[in-house]
Image (spheres, helix red, strand yellow):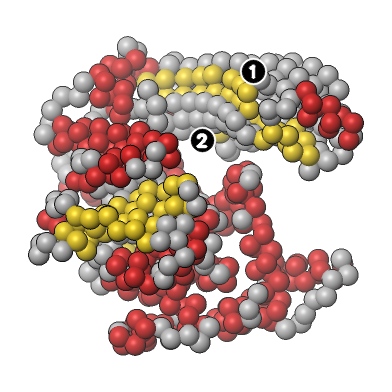
Amino acid sequence: MSMQGPQFLHERNPNLHTTPPVEHEKSRKRKKGEKSSQKPAEKISDWLGVIEKTHMGHRDDPRVLDRIKQSYYKSLVIKPENIPDSYYETQRRLARELGHGDVEITDEVRRQAEEVIVADQKSTLDNWLDYFTSEDSISFPTWAKYWAFTGMVKLSTFDKEKQVFGKRRKDTVAPFPDLNREALAYVVDAMAKKINKENVSLAEDDPEFKKLLQGANFGKLYAWAIEKVTPAEESELMITTGDWIKYNEGADHMPLVESLQGHGTGWCTAGESTAEAQLENGDFYVYYSHDKQGNPIIPRLAIRMEGENIAEVRGVAAQQNLDPHIANTDILDDKLNKFGKEGERYKSKSAAMKRLTELEAKNNASEELSMDDLRFLYEFDGKIEGFGYEKDPRICEIFSGRDMRADLSHILGIPKFQISTTKAIALSGNIKYHHGDLVLDLLSSAKVLKLPEAISGDLDLSRLASVDGLKLPESVGGYLELSSLTSAEGLKLPGSIGGDLELGSLTSAEGLKFSESIGGWLTLGSLTSAEGLKLPESIGGNLDLGSLTSVEGLKLPKSIGGVIYFSKDISVTEQDKLRQQYPNLKLLFE
């Protein structure tokens, strides 16, 4: 690793090289007999290497990222006890101004507010963590990610009028800043060039930016870049005629960069280093719609290739989803048709975006939604998958004007009072269906727990150490987290689990009975024996059996969507036997 970046971090924080994490890496190297340095930049460089290794390790195992996130939540997300009374007074005042009279701030109101504030901070922090640990940001050096991330977590709300971020304190209730990939790429590219003593052309053209670059304050640079990245006007987005341009693999990346910068696409490809890295791996297609003068210069769609495969399709709406004007045309479908089978994978997403555009128009016109519309909107017949990094925000916008419990009652034929959309109602008892996730990660006992009969999203009971009193739902649409259970005795699992099942602390399979299929991963990483283990017939993701010392008597599922992890300590004879017995399954011994 070049020392310019670590030296820059040392200059920004002269005490960084003496902090416990950096000193820990130095001690670890010494204990292993490896060469370690006393020089601040070299110590920081060694530590950055550890960060890179640990934070990127989730690509094959998402549980690693989850553990990393939990650590960041603990140190960065507001504690409920730190939410200031002034927040609740502001909510009371707003309610009065909206004509709701004097609203009492009860303990229940406080609990619900705490849930929302904490969840929003976690989800917005996740945006940054997911991006910085993904392949999409691989062109950013680790030191730059550290600089940007540690700068970001000090920021609060963005004041568009003053074009500055507020400062974050331990009692700040606001979510973390929005992730604008294009603005971030501007900033990281410019800072990396400055550190490497390369010419920063943007700084030469803009004295204000040059001054900000000298100060190296991430918040100020990011605020400047956000304002520079100006999205196209709605009147321009209504024009959908235009042309596709292909940028060939290995070609000069600057024409692509220059065609994107300043248009507010939100694409990280607007950054030079990212564009260069992406064109090294495959072709890049951009659809440019006409401006008011009829010139095809406004980027609206991107198709990025990795070799012969489509790596991603992106639009210019929030979170890089398709904007409704483009989504309502056949422009993308016509292009995808030219990619054969590879394009077919994305056409269902395009169809979903068109359907969502229709629902948005109906909702805006106050038209009644049909039963099919509602089933689509509430994802009863399949997930609504768009092209962005997150769910299309139009879904939440439609929900915001509707009585969700009434909708769900109509779909399911269940009385409204037996449907919940919040944790408080979900745990009140006699609830047949809960829409959304139910995060009970602080619960250590289930003795008085009354769970809904069905949950559409995730159920997190990660601290529950005993099944005493536990009655799980009949179905869980997302993942089921029971990572602290060490015994399955008395455990009755749901008949249907749509996502992962986390039972990573179980040491015995005695009494464990699965449903026929699990939609995601099945984690049984602490089982040392396969005795009594009867696995599901089908598992959608990976299967972790990493602590088994013998596979004697083990019968594997007929269908596995991912990899089966075993310990490398399994004998070579047993490994060969398994491979011969299950030639179509992916077995990994490590």
**Rendered residue at 83%/32% (across/down):** 575
**Rendered residue at 81%/69% (across/down):** 29
Q: Is 488 displayed left or right of 422 in the figure?
A: right
The residue carrying pointer 1 sits among few (fewer than 14), some (14 to 19) or many (20 or more) residues within 10 Å by Cα, namely some
Q: Nearer the viewer, residue 276 or 204?
A: 276
Furthest residue to the top? 413
Q: Nearer the viewer, residue 429 or 381?
A: 381
Q: Nearer the viewer, residue 241 or 338?
A: 338
The residue carrying pointer 2 sits among few (fewer than 14), some (14 to 19) or many (20 or more) residues within 10 Å by Cα, namely some
Coordinates of residue 251 in the picture (x, y in percent): 43, 67
Say which amino acid is labelled 1. Glu
- Mark 2 or mark 1: name the one nearer the start of the chain: 2
Label 1 SS: loop
Q: Nearer the viewer, residue 58 or 236?
A: 236
Taking the image as drawn, is residue 348 in sight? yes
Coordinates of residue 426 in the picture (x, y in percent): 44, 25
Residue marked by disc 2: 439
Q: Is 364 displayed left or right of 513 in the figure?
A: left
Could you say which quadrant of the image residue 348 lies in?
Answer: top left
How far apart are the alpha carbons under marks 2 and 1? Answer: 28 Å
**Rendered residue at 52%/26% (across/down):** 498
Q: Is residue 55 above or below residue 462?
A: below
Q: Is 270 displayed left or right of 457 in the figure?
A: left
Taking the image as drawn, is residue 223 in sight? no
Say which amino acid is labelled 2. Val
Q: How many marks?
A: 2
Q: Is 482 displayed left or right of 172 in the figure?
A: right
Residue marked by disc 1: 537
Res 22 label:
none
**Rendered residue at 87%/66% (across/down):** 32
